[in-house]
Amino acid sequence: MKYNLKKYGQYKNDIFNKLDFPFKKGKNILDVGCGDFSDARIFYEYFGLEVYGIDIYEHDNKDNSLFLEFRKANIFEIPYPDNYFDYVFIHDVLHHIDEKNQEFEKHITGIRELKRVVKKDGTIIVIEGNRFNPLFYPHMVIMRRHNHWRQKYFKKVISCVFSKVDFKYFESHLYPKKCFKFWKIYEFIMEKISPNKFLAYNVAIIRK
């Protein structure tokens, strides 16, 4: 399938097209770590979902997010009942759980909470930056101090909680407009010849 999300920017358009997930209009979704509501807005405006969001911070543009129900909360105590959501979406959040110490048990606890709130036959979508991607490692890990997970660890944590998982991997970045075609060639080459363990994003599509 092909989504036309260019109005939301090159990066969002690429991410959702490479995710290639068939969201069903009218279903509800929880955006965990919803940040500036940019993903949540796409779920509401483009996919026609009923959108809920949680984050440990209230973003400055919260007053412009009347399209979703927002609650200030963390992944360890999601303030919704068991089996409540058709979809749970979490994008570049898991590595921030206990970012300083990176305790395995805390990671597992957070992921189990995602499992608790998704409906039977619902879907959890996890998108996480890959630590050893050639662009992410110098920029995000070294310069910006993000403690992105290794692909092997990502798969281990997810597989400890879930058995029905489809893993996929792709290359996607916010590219500067100058030399855009060059970066798209780089992306194409990476996806064709690079081992999965070096691609930018680790994705888990989980069915409860």
Image (cartoon, rainbow, N blue to C red):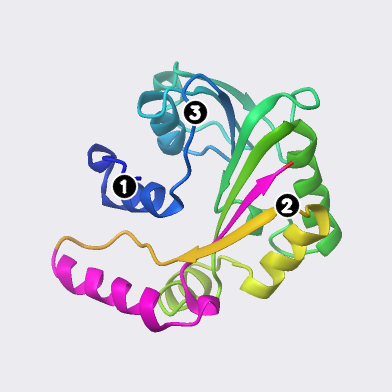
Dot 3 surroundings within 10 Å: few (below 14), some, or many (20 or more)? few
**Residue situated in front as seen by the camera: 37 or 187:** 187
| SS label for mark 3 | loop
The magenta segment is 178-207
* Distance (Cα) linking label 2 and label 1: 27 Å
- Extreme-right residue of the structure: 105
Mark 3 vs mark 1: which is more N-terminal? 1
* Distance (Cα) linking label 3 and label 2: 20 Å
**Residue situated in front as seen by the camera: 11 or 147:** 11
Residue at x-position 63% and y-position 68%? 149
Q: Position of residue 129 (x, y in %)?
A: 52, 63
Image quadrant assignment for residue 32: top right
Q: Nearer the viewer, mark 2 or mark 1?
A: 2
Q: Quadrant of the N terminus?
A: top left
Mark 3 vs mark 2: which is more N-terminal? 3
Q: Position of residue 57 (x, y in %)?
A: 58, 36
Q: Quadrant of the C terminus?
A: top right
* Distance (Cα) linking label 3 and label 1: 18 Å
- Extreme-left residue of the structure: 178
Magenta-colored stretch includes residue 188:
yes
Residue at x-position 29% and y-position 39%? 8
**Residue situated in front as seen by the camera: 5 or 9:** 5
**Residue designated by label 1:** 13
**Residue designated by label 2:** 164
The amino acid type found where label 3 is placed reads Lys
**Residue situated in front as seen by the camera: 48 or 55:** 48
Residue 24 bears which disc, if any?
3
Please report contact status of discs 3 and 1: CB closer than 8 Å, yes or no: no
| SS label for mark 2 | loop
